[in-house]
Image (cartoon, helix red, strand yellow):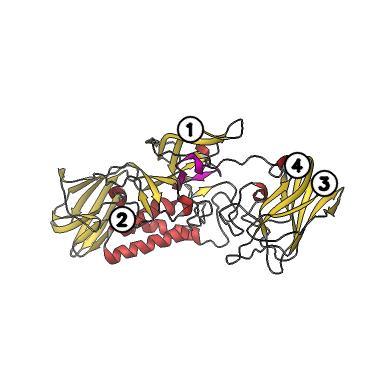
Amino acid sequence: TLPNVRAYNETCAAIALALWNHRMFLLHGEAKYIDVLERIIYNGFLAGISLSGDRFFYPNPMACDMKFKFNHGSLERSPWFGCSCCPVNVVRFIPSIAGYVYAARGDDAYVNLFIGGSGKVKLGSRTVTLTQKTEYPWKGAVKITVDPDKAGKFALHVRIPGWSQGQPLPSDLYRYVSPDAADYTLKINGKAASPKVEAGYAVLRRAWKAGDTVELDLPMPIRRVLAHEKSEDDRGRVAVERGPIVYCIEGADHGGKVMNLFLPDDAKLTPEVRADLLGGVTVLRGKGAVAYRDKNTKPATKPADVTMIPYYAWCHRGPNEMAVWLPRTAELATLAPLPTVASQAKASASHRGNADHVSALNDRLLPKNSNDHNVPRFTWWDHRGGTEWVQYDFKKPTTISGVEVYWFDDTGRGQCRVPASWKLLTRDGKTWKPIPAKGKFGTAKNKFNEVTFKPVTVKALRLEVKLQDKFSGGILEWRLITKQEK
């Protein structure tokens, strides 16, 4: 599975993959490696740094639910980290990008990336200056002026991006819903040309002189992307691209909420230039839909305006919900669960893990198993052994007759285990007193452990645990049994 909310996608790993693919290109001369490099430059790596250049993401998730604090305990980019490999990697990678734009081998010059500016390549005894004018990645028109210091014959290899040929990446991990190639055009000195394409490059082998021009025009249709069926978290979902840019939806454009939004297959999206937004971006606008609960608490849907921004530009308007992989139907849209006595209680704890939150105790999101990392969790990490607690405080006296606890246990992955034992306490004045249970206080994995007792009216309820020696522990959900919720 490729998780979205808890995706790690380390900024350093994106940079490492970019460096690897550039070296593979240097070895094999194939454009598919530059396709990956380009994808990273505009998306996976670029999201890791703020527009101001001084704040960073360590991981880059594909969704933010505002519960899982993915960035080392934060929901926003941070100025520094204890292990700060990502910021310093960013600092060295950005100035290296200029070295990936062009390449040379023998009498062959390569145009890999479409970036305004000029560069020089050495072809034998000849030096060739290549100058680009383009508004890529927002527009697909690229004009290349070729200025050799000595006129003569050599080959110019101009990359035809895989995204323009119906392939998002050189693998079967992702595919376009409509994989048809876009009809790009290429001109030499204003005249149409149809050169042979080799290894992903249009090869222009001719006698060149100073001032010759090459014009490449790449149409930029808005494409929907599907993931491989084995990617469980992305089944029934779609991502959206335009050119090399991957898009997302963000709460800042949708009243703070996007997890309940879905994008039907027939929803039309239109590009719109927004020079005033996020440093100047092209957004995608259209009609989607949202799922909600009507007056009878039954799921319903209604149309909704959708604005998509480049993924790299998210989280610059404060922390908010975000999603790259959008449901195609209402069934996968996330509806807020119905309120319960537990969900309306105020949760607190003796301690919590840096990346966790007490709201996971009563968020009503049900795990698949005790080692489920795709739902928010509460842990006492990195406290090990000893006694810890979590607590519910109620706005008014509440009568309960039992509790259900789903323990977190990441055996094989981390250092959290089900507790050695636990008990329930209720407050009598300033004193906490045990609640006698009718059965055992269970510590089984992969299920709710239910404990019932004679109905008791409380204003606060505490779950006290004895952690296993040398291990920490946690809870994925803590439910209450009440008369009104039977």
Residue 132 shows in the view: yes
In terms of secondary structure, where does tag 4 sit?
helix
Left or right position of 149 against 354:
left
Nearest to viewer (mark 2 / mark 4): 4
Q: Quadrant of residue 223?
A: top left
Q: Which mark is residue 483?
A: 4
Cα distance between the residues tagged 1 and 2:
41 Å
**Residue identifier under label 1:** 304
Q: Position of residue 336 (x, y in %)?
A: 59, 41
Q: Position of residue 199 (x, y in %)?
A: 24, 59
Q: Amino acid at mark 2?
A: Val
| Of 221 and 104, the residue lying toward us | 221
Q: Amino acid at mark 4?
A: Lys
C-beta proximity under 8 Å, tags 1 and 4:
no
Cα distance between the residues tagged 3 and 2:
71 Å
Left or right position of 43 against 143:
right
**Residue identifier under label 3:** 456
In terms of secondary structure, where does tag 3 sit?
strand
Q: Which mark is residue 101?
A: 2
Residue pictured at 68% horizontal, 44% vertical: 343
Nearest to viewer (mark 1 / mark 2): 1
C-beta proximity under 8 Å, tags 1 and 2:
no
